[in-house]
Image (tube, rainbow, N blue to C red):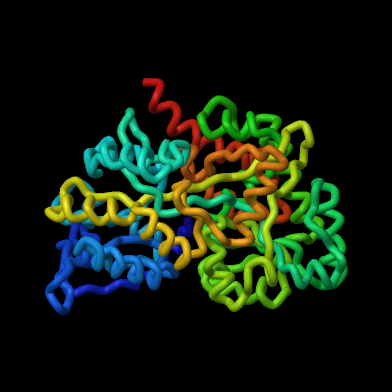
Amino acid sequence: MKFPKRTSALIATASVMATVGGLSFPGAAGAAKAPNGSSTYLQLANDKPTWTKGFNAIGKVLAGLDGVGWTAQPYSSTTAFQGVVRAAATTSQAPPVFTWWSGQQLVPLVQSGALADMTPMVKTWEAKYGLNPDVEAAYEVNGKYYGAPLYTSDWVMYYNKKVFAKYKLSVPMSWSQLMSEAATLKSHGVAPFAYYDDDWAGFIWFEQFLLSESPSAYQQLVTGKITYTSAPVVKAMEAWKQVADDGYFSVPQDIDTALSTPSQFAAGQTAMLLIGSWDETTLIGAGMVPGKDFGAFIIPPINPAAGWNAIFETGPVVVSAHNSDEQAALKSVNTFMEPSVQAKWDKLQSFVSAESAVPTTDPTAISVANEIKAEKVHLTNRYWEATPPQIAVPVASDLSKFILNPNLNLMPFLQTLQSVANSYWSTLKK
């Protein structure tokens, strides 16, 4: 999901403040009674301020069903959010319910004993609601499950359908066609691809280029089996730089602004947007209609031998094992996974549920699903979750600066990234 600017302040305030390790957490004391006293609302800590309306709406649904709802407590800075949660995670001041990330990002919290075990509930969701076990596997650590899917998301290329129609472009079925269409757009003064300028966003195009060149190299890189200076990585970086040198990226945009107010894309100043499908609700919020004003497609491979590949992302809602409201929090999450609630959540956020009992009606999601099936697209876990956070965070920050420096010497730059990786992987060999 999004990881906004680290320099931003908290946007959430609450009547109860707890301080842990010098960091403030809003409402860390946990539950609050609704004004009428009939329901308990747990504060849902998150770094997704644009989801506040949806969180609060579904929170009221949960409260109406089982008496335990959610109230969004958003941070506008992911770095601050992560710092506060990690500092409070094993104390009574931990948030009762909070969003997090899957894969390697989840492991440290589990290892510290911070999260409640949801394994019995997960097995029930699989049996009763058709929860996709491949999605839930992203929250599995040492045979147990520690999260419920808040969203599932394919990283796709959104495109402005009116712009494509204006210049007689079609969904590209090859990399060469995509580049040809980018050249056409540039010749008419339209930026082909949006580019984000932010510390975390550096991995977005990096993972796409490497996956398009060699999915096996991608898997080997994130697990430390090859280096950032290896031939496949160099080739992917050169391809990325070529697209930048051809002038196909927009002027770098602040990602917080671009994702919360996608005015350039909506106005047709930028034609295509590589982002997780979780961002579709923002496009709709900007007045765009899915299937009419925008569509989405899977990016064709640069190397045809690599086959069709796309990034997959899923993020959980988790429960603190140390907050006094643990049982109420687990109850709320269990209610959240009921198909009737999932259907409401998907409608609020334009999401696609991980449960087969909850079909989607979103035309863009249906189109992407059909393309995944037709092209036999292989879905791969996102870089941010696939490689350890000790590597992902600093490397993504460095990658965000890559095309901003046209005179950058590639190999020394990659050696810098590898030194970060070496610092982590070497600790595992001792």
x%, y% of residue 266?
Answer: 66, 74
Residue 308 lies, in percent from the top left, at 70, 39
Residue 182's place in the image compared with 387, above or below, is below
Q: Is residue 67 above or below residue 388?
A: below
Residue extending farthest to the top is 430
Looking at the image, is 292 positioned above or below residue 308? below
Q: Is residue 133 above or below residue 69?
A: above
Kindly identify the residue that appears in the image at 85 percent across and 48 percent down. Answer: 176
**Residue 113 in the figure: left or right of residue 235:** left
> Residue visible at 54% across and 60% down?
198
Instruction: Report the side of 338 relative to 415 (left or right).
Output: left
Residue 60, percent from left and from top: 29, 70
Q: Nearer the viewer, residue 373 or 190?
A: 373
Q: Looking at the image, can residue 213 be seen?
A: yes
Count of numbered marks:
0
Q: Is residue 389 visible?
A: no
Q: Position of residue 14 (x, y in %)?
A: 22, 73
Q: Residue visible at 78% across and 56% down?
A: 171
Q: Is residue 138 left or right of residue 71?
A: right
**In this rendering, position of residue 271 left or right of residue 203:** right
Q: Residue at x 59, y 40 (%)?
A: 379
Q: Quadrant of the C terminus?
A: top left
